[in-house]
Amino acid sequence: MDDGRLKFDEGPRRALAVVTDHYRHSELPDLDSPSRDGEATARILGNPLIGGFDPVETLLDPDVRTATNRIYDFFASAQPDDFLFAYFSCHGRRTPNGRLYLTTIDTDPDRLPPTAISADYLAEQFDGSRARRIVVVLDCCHAGAFTGDPRLRGSRDRILVLTAGASELAHEGDRGQAVTGPSKFADAFFEGIETGRADNDNNGLITVREAFDYAVARLRDTGAKQTPQMRAGITGDMVLCRAPVRRGALPPPIDALVRSSLPSARQVAVDELAHWLSSADTTVVEAAETALAELRADPNERVAQAASRLLSRRYAVASGRLATEASVVVKNPDPLWYRRAVCYEIQVRSFADGDGDGIGDIRGLIDRLEYLQWLGVDCILLSPIFASPLKEDGNDISDFTAVHPDLGGIAELVELVDAAHRRGIRVLLDLVLNHTSDQHAWFESSRRAPDGPYGDYYVWSDTDALYAEASGSVAGADQSGWSAQSGWTYDPVRRQYYWHRFGPNAPDLNFDNPAVQDEILRILPYWLDLGVDGFRLVSAPYLFERDGTPCEGLHETHAYLRKLRAELDRDYPDRVLLAWADRWPAQARVYFGDPAEGRECDMVLFTSLMPRIFLSMRRESHHPVSTLLSQTDAIPANCQWGLFLRNGDEMSLDTIDEDGREYLLKEYAPLPRMRSAVGIRRRLAPMLDGDRGQMELCMALLLSLPGSPILYYGDEIGMGENLMLPGCAAIRTPMQWSTERGAGFSTAEPDQLALPVLLNSTYGYQAANVVSQRPISTSLLSTIRRLIQIRRHSPALNGGRFVPVPSSNSAVLAYLRQDGPDCMLCVANFSRYPQPTELDLSAHAGARLVEATGGSRFGTVTEAPWTLSLAGHGFFWFRLTDAAPPPSLPASLPA
């Protein structure tokens, strides 16, 4: 069975480099780097041990006729099994209407169409070739002005790399003593390949994505002012070449520790290498010595000293603990990365079992990072992984500085973070702030020694009459309705009541005690020093209590969140705090902070949007969504909403009025077992009756509305729920990787699995799994991946402003996302039936509409209303090329 793992394509591989150094026209200055780019292409990709491309043809300083003919022959002569690689390095010029042209030696800047290579012509050859795999790199100024994306056709894979934005310059290489080197991008791109450093996962292969990501990171390190883009139409990852052998005898886990950005991980590497020095295999000893020689020059003094001592004495050193006090070294951190992120929420216990015990763990997650990188997510959000008795689904933490032993240990987490970072993926952890487990050492000390150091760590009272307005809501016995219960529980040891906003197994911390505040201020840096990129603050609104109030979102809570953010800003400016507050936007946005008083959280979950998307789907009207967006005020420029459709908890209906709540329960949870105390305990696919059109429409909204999307694991393949399981376990069944027994999740016997795999003819692992869908370009998984790719490469969808577009049809929602010259028109039909609509796009008259998912052109916008027809539950994403910013249109919901 094809497991979807990456392989080196042994078929015919041909490469072409079209490079122009010299120009006859005085307005086009000569260049030095293009010929060097061609030489690098031939030397590295032509190496049979690396790229294996043969032949590699370099076309130096061609005239336009020669270049056009050779480009045609290169693509038109390809056979179906060919792999083609083309590198273009030259001046890039734009016409007044924004069309991109690649220059040749005889180009006249005033007559570009007949004297230069049209990007449209290149796209036509690129898309029309029979070759199974094609990679094209445009290394020129204004490369981002290339219109459209590679078209996805059957099993033919296409990747387009643009080395600069539409309005940016592509920079030449550094000038040496005698000659200039390759361009900034080519130098970084081919360096990663030639050295093997781009092989992030140490599997001996370098994909186009790995080479691209390495180049982008190197450009960022050097401060080059250009923003490369990668546009792709592929059904699987594309292996570009083999990785040269660097430290042949070291196993990948040790090599990963040596290369880690974490001083603590490199310290562990020194300890591990001590054992390798005593190996009987001389090649192993040589590899260990080579690695230690590198670490001897480590910028971290402790690592360098340990490596030096080991090399000089040549004896085994005892395995040491992680140096958690060492800070992570981050080069040129991007403090606003979260505004562009596509996040993926994972229930670690249910994602992948790496040791065969039936429980998902960190090792299994590490093994599946390749899939997440392929999918296109650049941030993962992990459900609670801390030590816990698991009486409250892991939210009852018994040790804030330990990983639950079922999932692994600190070393595994460090390895996960480092491996994820090498793939361009950030890691967020769920952190419950307001309470602990009743088995936490603090609580045990507090209940047994009221006058001791922990006596005031929790909220104790001689009466259970306080905070009546804030009594917790807990699930009823049948999980079908709303059941209020007192938030106080009597403790016979201390002979007092303790307060718990949630269950009695989770006593609330007393944040009025400065010592408690300081404890939390110490906990966050502990994990941040290990490389974690931030936290989702579960139950953030409930830190303080005051009698006569709901004990939610109090002024003291916001003051502490500001203090927390200020502490992080001092040492961790690029780390993120994401608040979970199930409230209407006006109440939720306060968790961003106030410009006058200070920042709080960088992101806040937009919990009120999700149920309104489901309302719009059933009512076949955009009004539930559009009304909410129109009533949502602007947020600070350095903040972002977190968008989601479903997650690992029940779908809360707190932000819906009584009529809307009853309607949603009737439509989406008609059976009592589908309901929980606060909402609906179902997954996305069965809620939408397994309808592909509805699922794709919801995903298109998630990925195009203003905010950073958070996908829930398994939704991309249409997983279902198991309503025979209690509570939220129903929507946390094992990830469905394949049709193998155990769904590819675990090799354990079925009765050893922590949760059973889903057996269902529509949503179960035999029908919905990664291996079956990954190779099929029209599958749900491939479609969602395609939308993620388009979003990641669109500045407008990533962080552009949101401008509603009036629609003549109440079933059709339309809006623009715009960031500078990049403009996307998004149109969605909430009706099950085909619907026409008229849109007012007169502010963009003259712009051309190109459908983003397939590249089809839809004509030019005029002053007249633009008529469009959509299929039932259909959607369109249009890229407006040559679109000017709309005059004085307000952005109702700036992202």
Image (cartoon, rainbow, N blue to C red):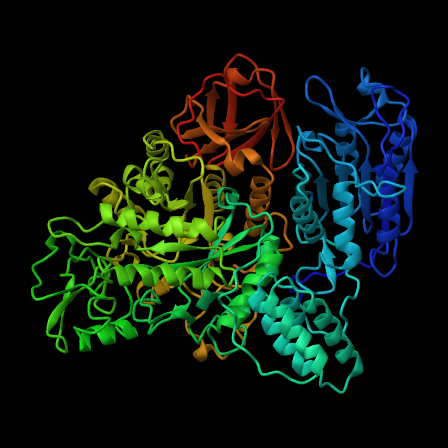
Q: Residue at x 36, y 54 (%)?
A: 537
Q: Residue at x 51, y 19 (%)?
A: 886
Image: 99 above or below 536: above
As drawn, is 742 to the left or to the right of 251?
left
Quadrant location of the N terminus in the rendered image: bottom right
- Comparing 738 with 120, the one in front is 120
As drawn, is 874 to the left or to the right of 463?
right
Query: Residue 402: x and y, percent?
Result: 42, 71
Q: Name the residue at the top extreme.
A: 863
Image: 500 above or below 659: below
Query: Residue 135: x and y, percent?
Result: 76, 45
Quadrant location of the C terminus in the rendered image: top left
Image: 172 above or below 682: above
As drawn, is 421 to the left or to the right of 724?
right
Count of marks placed on residues: 0
As drawn, is 795 to the left or to the right of 214?
left
Query: Residue 581: x and y, percent?
Result: 31, 48
Q: Residue at x 32, y 60 (%)?
A: 518
- Comparing 459 with 588, the one in front is 459
Query: Residue 785: x and y, percent?
Result: 58, 48
Image: 471 above or below 19: below
Q: Residue at x 57, y 59 (%)?
A: 420
Decide if residue 574 is in sight here.
yes
The image quadrant that residue 243 belongs to is bottom right
Decide if residue 731 is in sight here.
no
